Image: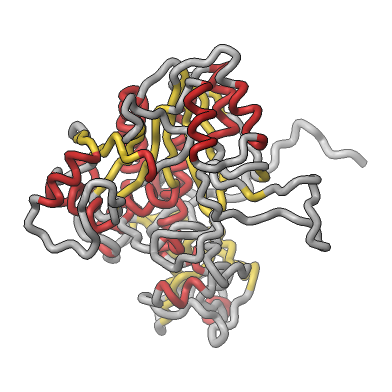
Amino acid sequence: MTSDPTTARSPRRTPIAALLANPSPDAEVEITGWVRNKRVGKNIAFLEVNDGSRLANLQLVVKPDGPVDFSEVEAVDKGAAVRARGTLVESKGKGQSWEVAVTSIEVVGTCDPEAYPIQTKRTSFEFLRTQAHLRPRTRTFAATFRVRNALAHAVHRFFQDRGFLWIHTPIIAASDCEGGGELFRVTDLEGKDFFGNPSYLTVSGQLNVEPFASAYTDVYTFGPTFRAENSNTARHAAEFWMIEPEIAFADLGDVMDLAEDFVRTITNEVHERCAEDMAFFDKWIEKGVLSQVAETVNKPFARMTYTEAMEKLSASGRSFEHPTNWGDPLQTEHERWLAEEYVEGPVFVTDYPTEQKAFYMRLSEDRRTVAATDLLVPRLGEIIGGSQREERLDVLESELERRGMETAPYWWYLELRRFGSTPHGGFGLGFERMLMYLTGVSNIRDAIPYPRTPGQAGF
């Protein structure tokens, strides 16, 4: 016997967020989720259930003289998965406006309360990193990954609304984009180069997306990147995500204009879409982060050259750990002072010394500096790195030679300068660092679902 194709199935579930966004008093509802808390008294029982769709739980109310056997509720433990049916009613208790008077409840998946690792309200982040499979059930990480999702949506919407093409650049690359040599090499199980020549996990999609800017003008890539950097700081991970737009017929000023518009737009969208979660971060993770970020990104971003930045640092009267002479790299302490104390907001630093930056950045006439920029923000320091690319073939070939780099792996990159070359540029934004900036989360390990750091690749 075949089923009737015209017979509509009932909805699988009603998300709690959708239910409470437009509550209908006395409506019959069915919800699913995981028990966050349970309180059982002689005359009433309360179960707080969350399905991940919002920060706040939905309270289920069961009475001994109701249609549900009270012993069924007493057997439900924290962490268990449940399906409940009942009536949506206004709540007389504190902390919620609505609750469900339960008419039936089913334990879909049991949970041993003695063995369940998520026990206390203030379990440390360090411990939860060892429980990456369960930490999304905590309030902090549930909020973090909802904001991460909204941020990714905002990234794509920004570029798609402006006519950019999303290009899927390869994860396996044949060359080092940055020239730093911090690469994961790809081999087969016998240690042989599977592709015939050395290949690596990509550190950036930039080189591979540039040819598409030479055909479509405005493009971007958004995907995972990898660095074999033996660093255990709160800002570094071996696997992280990068957003890298590339625009043709553009100079460094165009790149900074795009970056400023981008950061401001995606920030405002996340603040609007994730108001409940952002209020949580503002109260519990980094007090004042919501207003601090909103106020700083909605005013014009400052711009100064590297030379000016070094002059300001040297004249600040501050005793920095690292030197501030021309030619020295800007360290995090310098970046934060510029953004937090001198500018009190985001600042683009431009025209860095040639030796500090990658081979593909456009040389100045005296060859002392390149048309590069870093965007510095309070609390984190650098969040964006970008440049105008070197579009002159002879200069690019000369720079590769001067740096002692092999030209063979870049033959195709050089050919772009032979066939219809244009001034062009772009930037890279570390997705996790942007998430950290918005939420106040201070460790990159807590901004990515499964962190990969030196000595740690579990799960």
Location of residue 183 by image quarter: bottom right
| Residue lying at 40% horizontally and 82% vertically, measured from the top left | 41
In the image, residue 82 lies at what x, y percent? Answer: 58, 66
Q: Residue furthest right?
A: 1
Quadrant housing the C terminus: bottom right
| Residue lying at 55% horizontally and 77% vertically, measured from the top left | 76
In the image, residue 217 lies at what x, y percent? Answer: 51, 17
Q: Is residue 217 left or right of residue 260?
A: right
Residue 139 shows in the view = yes
In the image, residue 323 lies at what x, y percent? Answer: 22, 58
Task: Work out whether residue 271 or residue 429 is closer to the camera in this orientation and state it.
Answer: 429
Task: Work out whether residue 48 or residue 71 is closer to the camera in this orientation and state it.
Answer: 48
Task: Work out whether residue 57 or residue 249 is closer to the camera in this orientation and state it.
Answer: 249
Quadrant housing the N terminus: top right
In the image, residue 324 lies at what x, y percent? Answer: 20, 53
Q: Is the residue 24 above or below the residue 44 in the image?
A: above
Q: Is residue 414 left or right of residue 363?
A: right
| Residue lying at 37% horizontally and 39% vertically, measured from the top left | 354
| Residue lying at 26% horizontally and 39% vertically, measured from the top left | 349
